[in-house]
Image (cartoon, rainbow, N blue to C red):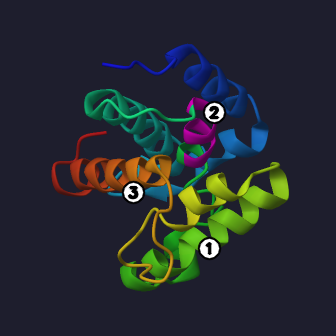
Amino acid sequence: MHHNDSKIFYDEVDRLLNDPKVRGMSSFSQHKGTNTLRHSIKVAQASFKLAEHLGWDIDERELARGALLHDYYQYDIQERGLGPYRHGTSHPGIAAKNAEADFSLNDKELNIIKSHMWPLTLLTPPRSREAVLVCMADKYIATKEMVFHRF
């Protein structure tokens, strides 16, 4: 079974975590007591572990960037007055726009961010293994956070 390079993956995660704008995601609450940064780190870790479990060859750097920035929407959901459905359908595009403005992202990384809520975002499906991994990992982590209150 092929193993992806965890050093490349976690080096990119660490590089992004050194950015003050990424660290600022910790100020936005999410999913019953966690915050957007902690959630995004968990999704990144789960995405990489899932790739290993499935034996999928991935681009470690693109997966790290897409996973860590998938919720880079930079607002407080309650303050915006958005319901869960409206936030669910709109935040992937907002996160992609914000991430593209602050970081140099390629098309695959943008698709990872834009498609992570699929099938809720019906017209924006995942177009790579990395995007499928983040989409699945996000649902797994969000379920743990919202239903089981495990962060």
Residue flagged by tag 1: what amino acid is it? Answer: Gly
Residue under label 3, please give it.
Answer: 135
| First-in-chain label (1 vs 2) | 2
- Please tell me how crowded label 1 is: few (under 14), some (14-19), or many (20+) other residues with Cα within 10 Å: many
Residue receiving disc 1: 93
Task: Give coordinates of residue 68: x percent, y percent.
Answer: 57, 43
Residue drawn at (64%, 52%) of the image: 109
Q: Amino acid at mark 3?
A: Cys
Magenta span: 60-66
The mark closer to the camera, 3 or 1, is 3
**In the image, what residue type sits under mark 2?**
Arg
Which secondary structure dominates the residues rendered in magenta?
helix
Question: Could you say whether the residue bearing mark 3 is in a helix, strand or loop?
Answer: helix
Q: Rounded to the nearest whole Å, what is the CA distance between mark 2 and mark 3?
A: 17 Å
Q: Residue at x 75, y 45 (%)?
A: 21
Q: Nearer the viewer, mark 1 or mark 2?
A: 2
Is the residue 40 above or below the residue 119 in the image?
above
Residue 44 is situated, as x and y percent measured from the top left of the image, at 47, 38
Q: Give the side of residue 2 with respect to residue 79, left or right.
A: left
The stretch drawn in magenta includes residue 62: yes
**Relative height, residue 14 to residue 121 (above, below):** above
Q: Earlier in the sequence, mark 2 or mark 3?
A: 2
Q: Nearer the viewer, residue 24 or 79?
A: 24
Identify the residue position indicated by label 2 in the image.
61
> Residue 104's spot in the image, x, y percent?
82, 49
Residue 38: x %, y % from top left: 47, 40
